[in-house]
Image: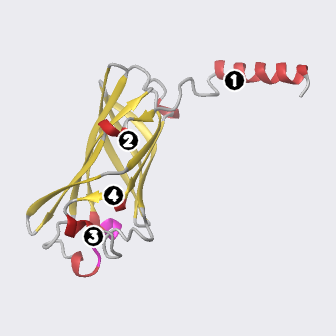
Amino acid sequence: MTRHMTSWLRTAVLAGAALGLAPAYAQQTLVPAQSEVTFVAKQLGVPLQGRFKTFAAQAAFDPRQLASSKIGFQVDLGSVALNAEADAELGKPEWFNTARFPKAVFQSTAIRQVGPGKFELSGKLNIKGQARDVVVPVQLTQAQGLSTAIGGFTLKRLDFKVGDGDWADPSIVANDVQVKFKLVLQGVPAL
């Protein structure tokens, strides 16, 4: 590449960034050891608390540039931890079918601020090949260079074909599943 072309390319990139054509923030990274994804389901009216041991997030979030911010999240469904018997059962085709659908995936389509440090993430949640629109409320706090996003939502397991066949009866296993998360991120710009 000639010196003239290199100089022109550098000038074009800097001009694009100055005009807001490129994000002025770096992609954030998840701190897994301080993060968690948990859930509560009910079987015969009895709450069962579980968690997922493996998950990942991709965030390019700037509270001053919400229109261009994006958040993606994946949960390894095979990493479920409820109890030994349930963990083995949940991987089967009538539940998560982890051989065919190993991950649950969320991708934001819009982020809206609803109060100081409070946001709503709209997006698509895909579990077991079934995609549904969801809105997830999130509270964001910042301290010591880290941002902590805490939130939760209720999903209808039957919308995602989780618990097919004999398990489709919501009087045995409730249709509502409460999902909660705490995600600790590095690199989020100040609120």
The amino acid type of the residue labelled 1 equals: Gly
Counting residues from the start of the chain, the first of labels 2 and 1 encountered is 1
* Disc 1 residue crowd, few under 14, some 14–19, many 20+, Cα 10 Å: few
Q: Which residue is mark 3?
A: 88
Counting residues from the start of the chain, the first of labels 3 and 4 encountered is 4
| Label of residue 79 in the image | 4
Point out residue 53 in the picture as x, y percentages from the top left corner. Answer: 31, 51
Q: CA distance from mark 1 to mark 3?
A: 52 Å
Residue that extends furthest to the front in the rendered view of this protein: 84
Q: CA distance from mark 2 to mark 3?
A: 32 Å
Q: CA distance from mark 3 to mark 4?
A: 10 Å
Extent of the magenta region? 159-164
Magenta segment: does it hold 160? yes
Q: Please tell me whether mark 3 sits on a helix, a strand or a loop.
A: helix
* Disc 3 residue crowd, few under 14, some 14–19, many 20+, Cα 10 Å: few
* Disc 2 residue crowd, few under 14, some 14–19, many 20+, Cα 10 Å: some
| 76 in relation to 115, above or below | below
| 32 in relation to 164, above or below | above
Q: CA distance from mark 4 to mark 2?
A: 25 Å
Q: Which residue is mark 2?
A: 121
Q: Residue at x 36, y 25 (%)?
A: 146
Q: Residue at x 72, y 24 (%)?
A: 13
Between residue 19 and residue 163, name the one nearer to us.
163
Q: Which residue is mark 1?
A: 16
